[in-house]
Amino acid sequence: MSMTDGLSATELERSIAKTLSWFSIFTFPLTTFEIHKWMFEPKRPFDLSDVCRVLETSEWLKKHVWRKNGFLGLKRIDGKVVDIDEWILKRKKGYIDSTKKMRALKRVGMYFRLFGSVRMVSAVNSIAWAQTQPKSDIDLFVVTKPNSIWFTRFFMVLPFMIFGARPISTDSNEKKRKNVFCFSFFLSEESLCMKKMQLDEDDYYLPLWIKSMIPILDHNQTLKKIRLENSWTNVYFPNAKFRSVHMLHHPNVFPPLLFSNPIFNRVCRIVQERRFPVSIRSLANKDTRVIISDSVLKFHDGDRRAVFRDEFKKRYASLV
């Protein structure tokens, strides 16, 4: 099927179609600015004005894309017409809920500043996209100093565990709690490059995850180091800049009080490994879902990146 005359227009239309196909998986309509920002693998640089022009003039895109109240999305998913109003309402509700969660995160953020071993804390996943629901976890990504990852995780998580603000184990039958904090990904600052954790070259979720994280604490220019170590993500999303520290959060106003040493770190490892649920122990270091080491702690036993990748390919293929 021919989209429009001219190679450049076709490339741009394809990038826009890819972007909308991906975000349709999450029932997430985009603004024109966001389409440009999160454009999938454009073959050459395109300005925001190029995106606006093509969205206005492309008959092919008009056939497949709806536009309402400043948002855009695919008209049909798996042959079914989407409920546009439902999509828009979901996004608005997600924004309101995630704003509340960011304020909750600010209240506990002062505790994270007590640790001399913490180099960066970022909000990730649904809260980073402002698309949480009342029962969504507040997912956090933490960077630590070398030889302190186990100590840091233990004492960061401890008060949340005591006060019931941690997610329920997948091995438990307890009812899911609201507004819990999930500490599922820690990196030591000597292991900041995450390219090796990508499933394959078509794993778009990881570079999107990296570029969408919202830092709430940044010491020793760790955010700058992450940008440099993960510059490979620019191949996928060249228009998306790494985010700065969130406006609700402020620099340290007092020195940290809690410091690690190698002995404490080893003890904390032993204690935590004994408490890992069966779902974590059974997957440990078998692939990129669950990684347990002295430099990486990644507990994504419900990793759905392969599902998202395959669904994206199917939805995009149905358009072209």
Image (cartoon, rainbow, N blue to C red):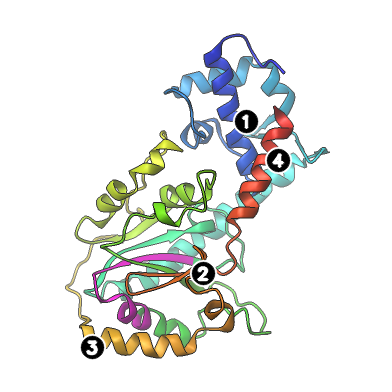
From this viewpoint, is residue 70 visible? no
Give the CA separation, mark 2 to mark 1: 35 Å
Residue ID for mark 1:
17
The three-letter amino acid code for the residue at tag 1 is Ala
Q: Secondary structure at mark 3?
A: helix
Q: Secondary structure at mark 4?
A: helix
Nearer to us: label 2 or label 1? 2
Give the CA separation, mark 2 to mark 4: 28 Å
Q: Secondary structure at mark 2?
A: loop
Q: Are marks 2 and 4 in contact (CB under 8 Å)?
A: no
The three-letter amino acid code for the residue at tag 3 is Ile
Q: Is residue 76 above or below residue 179?
A: above
| Quadrant, the N terminus | top right
Give the CA separation, mark 2 to mark 3: 28 Å
Q: Is residue 291 above or below residue 227?
A: below
Residue ID for mark 2:
286
Looking at this view, name the residue that lies furthest to the right: 80
- Label placed on residue 263: 3
